[in-house]
Amino acid sequence: MSDQPIYFDNNSTTFPAPETVEAILPVIGEGWGNPSSTHSFGQKARHEIEKAREAVARMLNCTPAELVFNSGATEGNNTAIYSALEGLPERKHIITTRTEHASVLEVVRYLGDSGYRVTELSVDRLGHIDLDELRNEISGDTALVSLMWANNETGVISPISAAGDIAKQFGALFHVDAVQAAGKLNIDLTEHAAIDYLTISAHKFHGLKGTGALFVRKDAGYTPLLRGGHHESGRRAGTEAVLGIVALGAAARMVSARLGEYATHMQTMRDRLQHSLLNTLDDIVINGDQHDRLPNTVNVGFKYIDGEALLMMMDAENICVSAGSACKSGSMEPSHVLLAMNVPLSAIHGSVRFCTSRYTSAEEVDELVQKTAKIVKRLGEMSPFGHDHKPASHTHEAMQRHRDYFAQAK
Ligand code: PMP
């Protein structure tokens, strides 16, 4: 096994870009003061943070004052949701979708158990919400509409402009989880006046893990999630993670300068991967819309293939990818995103997400396809599903639990 992984899991995390690492080295050496200290040594660190804030503001086309640095998008999403609800305290209804990340979905489900009414919009077979369903569900009681810009599992892009307009017609606050959009799509907040809150996370576009930013539009309500300090202009307690913030600033500068080039490269590599897989293997489907999709993502369903075995064999070849089924408490839980899209179980269980990055090379793609094809062919010969297309029973049970959940939620 070579030391270098064949890394196609870039929606999970990306490696720190050389420019990011270069930016933090002087901060480790000389800029390690506390940015809240009044002495000039501490103020050097403060200066670095404010430079990073300006860089992120340029990437998003907002003002620096509208950004709160935090520990990443899980914190950002939690903060946005609680801020919106405290901003409109008489309203008791939240709208989101079934395909959100857990840092939105599990929070609103928790709030649903605590007295809020929660609507989880359905998606169609391609992963799109129905704007008419949103129009039908929203009312003057809706405090928050929370919608991801692009889905982490399928790359499917949401109609955020239209959804934002609908939210505003009813005076609801609008939150967008833009974690997967940042560094891949142009985010211009002057073109999206309906967005009140937007979350990004540095490690998804070649910054460091554990740092992100929450955009809060000037007039939108804000409630700190963490209290007990006056950092971030009183909006988040806790000494700022200076290294992570400086890295985020450097990552944002790269995106501002070269997004078009990065997106074109990711897409060329993704398309090469998708076309070669389709040309090499039978019985594969692409999950999700192939047009309104991130440039770097393809979610492939290898029909009748055991996803767990597929991942294990790929791992043995040092290939890094994520699966449509995740191992939870000893059984394989199908992806809530693919389930919501009504992808057949035979395809969910053998689904794999491949994500390219600006650094992916054609040689890596070709090696990946060649190794994947070999593994899939081998597994196909010993498929536990056989070719009678029967799903494994543990997957069946997990699917039933999801169906029961949605039936109750209706
Ligand atoms: N939202 C989406 C769409 C994500 O993909 C992720 C990370 N997988 C998160 C939120 C959470 O981000 P973080 O790792 O910064 O907490």
Image: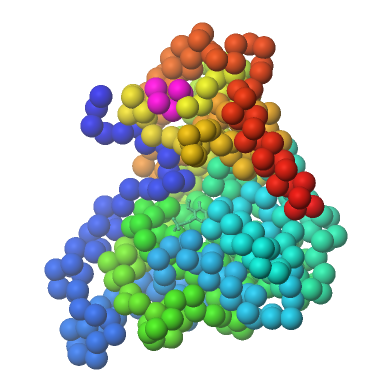
Residue 147 vertical position relative to residue 281 in the rendered view, above or below: below
Residue 279 lies, in percent from the top left, at: 55, 18
Q: Is residue 254 left or right of residue 103?
A: left
Spot occupied by residue 168 in the image (x, y as percentages of width and height): 75, 72
- Quarter of the figure with residue 393: top right
Nearest the eye: 85 or 355: 85
- Using residue 135 as the reference point, say whether residue 17 is left or right of it: left
Furthest toward the top, the residue is: 381
Give the overall secondary structure of the magenta segment.
helix
Task: Based on the picture, tell me whether residue 183 belongs to the magenta stretch.
Answer: no
Q: Residue at x 37, y 61 (%)?
A: 210
The extreme bottom residue here reads 38
Residue found 19% across the figure and 63% down from its top? 25
Instruction: Indicate left or right for 339 with 228 as reference.
Output: right
Q: Which residues are magenta?
A: 309-313
* Residue 211 visible, this orientation: yes
